[in-house]
Image (cartoon, helix red, strand yellow):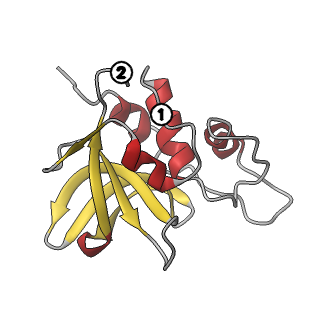
Amino acid sequence: MDDAPWMKIAKAEIGQAELKGEAENNPRILEYLATTGKFKADETPWCSAFANWAMVKAGKKGTNSALARSWLKWGEAIEEPRYGCLVVFKRGNSAWQGHVGFFVRMEGDKVVVLGGNQANTVSIAPRSKADLLGYRWPGPKD
């Protein structure tokens, strides 16, 4: 049984990318962004929107927030990562900035995640374990 059905949905989106220039926007990224607000440009930070979109498509609740760190209050905290769990990272120097993606695997001191807005695309990419804030799994109400 697949206990992370959102991963199949997220994987199918690999390659979706921002369009260059402010006048053009990828309609699919705007669709992701619509799950978190009324954003009109694909240059808007969209990692959390992608996570929300994938979870909603899988029949789960998301955070409805464009903030990556909103996922730290979603579902249940887990100590050890499992395939498909949400991984939240710090980013920048502020207490609100972050990045969120779906856990794929560990590679040394890197956490490899499937996520949106990774080099402006949906991709699988490594992030530093030093920036890790937490792992989350859907709770019974999610």
Spot occupied by residue 6 in the image (x, y as percentages of width and height): 37, 31
Q: Is residue 21 left or right of residue 33?
A: right
Q: Is residue 80 left or right of residue 11?
A: left
- Vertical comparison of 53 with 113: above or below: above
The x, y position of residue 28, in whole percent, is 65, 40
Residue situated furthest bottom in the rendering: 93
Mark number, residue 62: 1
Q: Looking at the image, which residue is at 46% across and 27% down?
A: 61
The residue that label 2 is drawn on is: 141
Determine whether, in the image, residue 129 is placed left or right of residue 67: left
Say what amino acid the circle numbered 2 marks. Lys
Camera sees residue 116: no
- Kindly identify the residue that appears in the image at 14 percent across and 50 percent down: 79
The x and y percentages for residue 92 are 49, 77
**How many numbered circles does the render carry?**
2
Q: Residue 31, located in which quarter of the rendered image?
A: top right
Image quadrant where one finds the C terminus: top left
Distance from the alpha carbon under mark 1 to that under mark 2: 11 Å
Asked which secondary structure carries label 2, the reply is: loop
Q: Residue at x 65, y 57 (%)?
A: 18
Q: Amino acid at mark 1?
A: Gly
Identify which residue, 17 or 47, lies in the foreground.
Answer: 47
24 to 110, vertically: above or below:
above
Asked whether residue 53 is in view, the answer is yes
Label for residue 82?
none
- Classify the position of the N terminus by image quarter: top left
